[in-house]
Image (cartoon, rainbow, N blue to C red):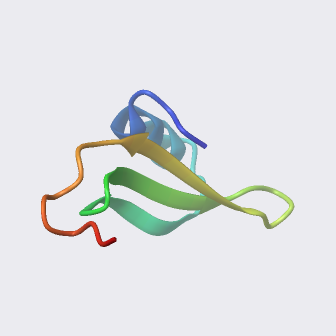
Amino acid sequence: MEVDDVDAVHACAVSAGLPIVLGLRSEDFGQRHFMTVDPDGLLVDVITVIPFTVGTATT
C-alpha cells in the first residue's frame, strides 16, 4: 500500500498496537516501508517512494 507519509502511518500503526513484522526502513531501491499483518493474516507492506541510491540499479 503506497502512502504519502509512511513515518506517520507507522506511528499510528504502533500506537494502535498493530503487529509490526518488519520495522520501518529505507531501501536503496527507492522505498521507505514497514510491514504489518491484517486481521486475516495477510501481510501488508506500507511504502512511500523515495529516491533510489545511485549504483543499485542493474540492467
Q: Determine whether, in the image, residue 31 is placed left or right of residue 20.
A: left
Q: Determine whether, in the image, residue 27 is placed left or right of residue 6.
A: left
- Image quarter of the N terminus: top right
The residue most toward the right is 40
Across and down, in percent, residue 18 comes to 60, 54
| Closest to the observer, 53 or 13 | 53
Displayed quadrant of residue 25: bottom left
7 above or below 18? above
Instruction: Name which residue lies at 37% across and 41% down.
Output: 49
Across and down, in percent, residue 8 comes to 38, 33
- Image quarter of the C terminus: bottom left
Instruction: Name which residue lies at 27% across and 66% down.
Output: 57
| Closest to the observer, 48 or 34 | 48
29 above or below 59? above
Across and down, in percent, residue 45 comes to 57, 56
Instruction: Name which residue lies at 41% across and 39% down.
Output: 6
20 above or below 10? below
